[in-house]
Amino acid sequence: MAQKGTLAVKKGLAQMLKGGVIMDVTTPEQAKIAEEAGACAVMALERVPADIRAAGGVARMADPTVILRIMDAVTIPVMAKCRIGHFVEAQILESLGVDYIDESEVLTPADEKYHVNKHAFNVPFVCGARNLGEALRRIGEGAAMIRTKGEPGTGNVVEAVRHMRQVMDDIRWLKGLPKEELMTAAKDLQAPYELVLEVAKTGRLPVVNFSAGGIATPADAALMMQLGADGNFVGSGIFKSSDPMARAKAIVAATTYFDDPKVLAEVSRDLGDAMTGVDIKTLAPEERMQERGW
Amino acid sequence: MAGKKVIGVLALQGAFVEHQAALRRCKAEAIRVRSKEDVKAIDGLIIPGGESTTIGRLLVDYDLGDSIIERSRAGMPVFGTCAGMIVMAKEIPGSDQYSLGLMDISARRNAFGRQVDSFEAYLDVKGQAKKIKGVFIRAPYVDRVWGETEVLSVYDGKVVMARENNLLVSSFHPELTPDLTVHKYFLGML
């Protein structure tokens, strides 16, 4: 008998996305550009993070019509975002047939204490994390894929770098610990002990880990790959730039040839203007999306 | 060629690391393939799962397609899993995307449905005594074969594994399970 919604098929789709770029899109036309440029999946949104930031107010799950039109437009996987803890938005997204749900700090959290119980769903979830403890808590709740958070909608890669380095440093640290120290490590990380044991043994996260939050250029994408990302989410960086098709293709190539500076130099040429970046230091504490999630 | 045979895994996008790991567990030498020069250095090639449109885009932009076609026509074994099956097919119904067009099959994309329909199931494979666990992720199936293509496995009435001389395809992902049967079968084609 066929078994659906198993951990192997949930984690498996993320494994198929590796080495690829997942692009934020808001219309079927943008989705087609992303697919044509070589995106391995798209994130269907009403607004990209830079516009969510500018608009203010409460950001919620997209209108199902927007998501369904994007699903109709492309053959690659379509992801969509629900608010942190908003399991009914997640139920709605699952019923639409989206391929992955992003329980995302880009939207305004619906619950300031609890995340969605992701084991209860057949559709897989990706969640944001800034460090290993946060990643393992999300995996403990059933996330089948992790992305480091960065600071969405800024076009500034500095927070993405900080979070990827933190996760990788935490893993290297854990790997070096003797077994009797792992329970206390789990306590310090606020992470499930069984997952801490697994990471200490294997030296890697039990699920795929993409980078996100501020990637705007091919060099940014390659930097995140060299730091250990399995692939890249690019939100505002593509459709807030002056030539989305050229930039999207270049970021796809840079994610594949991340360790080949000749290719990186070639694809970085003549891309027009990148999105205008934001200095993280100018953001008020309440404007920092990365602080959302517990 | 003297010495140990080298298997390339096309490393443009997708689950290439998992295939390399499976090959190494079979004691085979596995290298990443991302350039024309890499294609010259191998004795067999695996095209992994991933997104077939992404892999196709990069095969065209980085000019790898023709060298793979040339080697395969000269007899080099090629094994495609999932997206790799699509990339190897001569026909892809309802799509005008790039394919290498190596094998006499028609491969239908996402034919078992979207991710919520992805599944695991045990399969009978021709010539194998034991059933094999197949992990199917937004999987395609073969809806028509012709010429010398031989059907190796059928699930729910759909062809999920087939071979044409030096070419092998599967809808499912043997690289995601510990069972090395399918990789060993492919290595036997060298």
Image (cartoon, coloured by chain):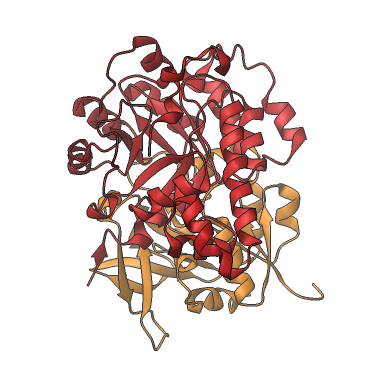
Image spot of residue A13 (x, y percent): 40, 52
Q: Is residue B65 left or right of residue A134?
A: right
Residue displayed at 61% across by 12% down = A272
A61 or A96: nearer the viewer:
A61
Extreme residue toward the right, this view: B2
Say left or right for A161 vs A138: right
Q: Please tell me whether residue B189 is drawn above or below residue B85 in the rendered image.
A: below
Q: Quadrant of the N terminus of chain B?
A: bottom right
Observer able to see residue B148: no
Decide which of A76, B150 is in the foreground and name it.
A76
Display colour for chain B: orange
Chain A colour in the picture: red
Q: Please give left or right for residue B134 compared with residue A267 in the image.
A: left
Q: Position of residue A273 (x, y in %)?
A: 60, 11
Q: Residue at x 74, y 27 (%)?
A: A265
> Which corner quadrant holds the C terminus of chain B?
bottom right
Relative placement, left or right, of A161 versus A9 is right
Q: Could you tell me which residue is drawn at 59 percent across and 42 percent down?
A: A166
B54 or B154: which is nearer to us? B54
Residue A82: name its quadrant: top left
Residue B60 location, x and y as percent? 59, 39
- Is residue A90 visible in the rendered structure shown here? yes
The image shows residue B1, relative to residue A37, as above or below, that is below
Task: Please provide percent x and percent y for residue B173.
Answer: 43, 64
Instruction: Name which residue lies at 38% across and 25% down.
Output: A25
Q: Quadrant of residue A275?
A: top right
Q: Nearer the viewer, residue A3 or A193?
A: A193
